[in-house]
Image (cartoon, grey):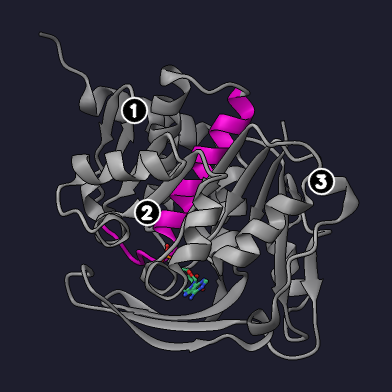
Amino acid sequence: MSLLVVGSVAFDAIETPHGKVEKTLGGAASYFALAASHFTSVRVVAIVGEDFTEKERRVFRGRRIDLDGLEQAPGKTFFWAGRYSQNMNERTTLATDLNVFGNFQPSLPDAYRDSSHIFLGNIDPTLQLSVLKQVRRKPHVVGLDTMNYWIQGTPAELRETLRHTQILMINDDETRQLTGEHNLMRAAKHIFKMGPRTLVIKRGEHGALMVHDKFLFSVPAFPLEEVHDPTGAGDSFAGGFMGYLAEAGKINEKTLRCAMVYGSVMGSFTVEKFGVERLAKVTRKEIHARAKRFSRLTSFEL
Ligand code: AMP
């Protein structure tokens, strides 16, 4: 099985009550790839500028991450800056400088065109669709993330891309906005009519809820004593989730439930340190140990 991700690779400036970093490797595809590479090999389709150096590339090296699809273009790398509130439940975006990301036209290296699992990170739905069009065979699984900007700005294009998507991973506000339905169960039914058969609602510190047309599954966020930086938790969740599914090779209730747990595990590691620091250091042993703790955390007998 082969997993491809398309999305942002960025420089982030982050400020939380625990500290501040001026310029650190970020972007949804970075978090996704680092998280997923603990489970399977990942192919990255993204764009960076001339300021993206060997130092940043080194973070991806020595892992199962293929950067042949990481285009380098004249100009600067996408830059995002955000500040978290004291309780870290609110985030203010201070800057979104698209730079080279503004002219991004994803182009898949030939070797990527047989990818069986594809994750369409939060970018223009027309570009998400263009990635699917470049794949030779119909992928086993297409997962998709999006945001209010695309839900409001390009609804028809998003609908078209959703027709080719099996797993939609968004937060509760986005779920409501996409469907015009406040109740999440009813919203999921709307979404099933659009294409996806599985909706994963990411709920930050409240965990994640999976609504499948045949079952429901909920995981908490792992209870941590200290959260240093919530940036990238959702993308790390998606990476753990899709990475696990690609490694499992099949989709059924059991693998989808485990994917939810491994998604939460990867999200929980990311928030322990700033940027991708913790994700880049975590070991397979730590990942499985935390998955076991999840199992104990949520098990009970009737
Ligand atoms: P999350 O915390 O899951 O929302 O992801 C944060 C990451 O998304 C940061 O590393 C940013 O670089 C990246 N990001 C922020 N805004 C955008 C955007 N408009 N498009 C793509 N990526 C973004």
Name the residue type under label 3: Arg
Q: Residue at x 27, y 28 (%)?
A: 216
The quarter of the picture where the N terminus appears is top right
Residue 133 highlighted magenta (yes or no): no
**Magenta run includes residue 240:** yes
Where 288 sits versus 32, above or below?
A: above
Label 1: few (<14), some (14–19) or many (≥20) C-alpha neighbours in 10 Å: few
Residue carrying label 1: 213
For residue 290, what is the image quadrant? top left
Q: Residue at x 73, y 86 (%)?
A: 51
Residue 38 visible to the viewer: yes
Q: Residue 46 placed where, x, y %?
A: 70, 66
Percent of width and height locating residue 177: 27, 62
- The span shown in magenta is 226-248
Q: Where is residue 141 in the image (x, y as percent from the top left)?
A: 59, 36
Identify the amino acid type marked 2. Answer: Ile
The residue that label 3 is drawn on is 113
In the rendered structure, which amino acid carries the disc numbered 1? Asp
Please state if 257 lies on the left or on the right of 115 as rendered. Answer: left
